[in-house]
Amino acid sequence: SMGLFLSLGMVSCRDPGILVRRRDNNDANNQHHPEEEEWIWNSQALTYRPPTARFDPECGVVIEEYDHLCPWTGTAIGKRNILWFRLFLFFVVGFLFLHLLLLLGVPIISSLLVMTV
């Protein structure tokens, strides 16, 4: 359960990849990723953004490699917290599966829990 809480904390409190707003196209292209394609003007955020970034209307920011806004973690999922989000999902699914086996009364799981206590 420590892994579950640690991954939830890292997803919720970590920067998902928020980009600084850039109003000048030359400044945006040369400073952040000079090797990538031209940055695109985003009229919702009033800034230039790389082709892989997206504007999140809920948070009001542009996020690198934006995936989605997660209602359970309360934050946007992007480039810098996607690994922790996947780890969080792994723990959630694992605990759900374990509890399902306990509810069904699978003897192997019950005996393993008795041995660890």
Image (tube, helix red, strand yellow):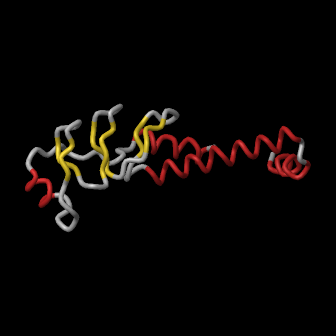
Q: Residue furthest bottom?
A: 35
- Quadrant of the image containing the N terminus: top right
User: With respect to residue 56, does 49 lie above or below?
Assistant: below
Q: In this view, does 110 lie to the left or right of 86?
A: right
Q: Measuring 55% from the left and 46% from the top, which residue is drawn there?
A: 88
Judge from the rendering whether residue 97 lies leftward or rightward of residue 39; answer left or right.
Answer: right
Q: In this view, does 22 lie above or below 36?
A: above
Residue closer to the observer: 58 or 31: 58
Instruction: Name the side, left or right, on which 116 lies relative to 75.
Output: right
User: In the figure, is residue 42 to the left or right of 65?
Assistant: left
Provide residue 64's location: percent of width, then percent of height: 31, 51
Q: Which residue is drawn at 12% across and 61% down?
A: 30
Q: Where is residue 116 in the image (x, y as percent from the top left)?
A: 80, 50
Q: What residue lies at 56% left-to-right and 41% top-to-bottom?
A: 5
Quarter holding the C terminus is top right
Residue 39 in percent (x, y) is at 19, 55
Tell me the quarter of the picture where residue 42 sits: top left
Residue drawn at the location 22% of the way across and 64% of the way down: 36
**Relative to 98, residue 57 above or below:** above
Depth check: give the residue in front, 11 or 61. Answer: 61
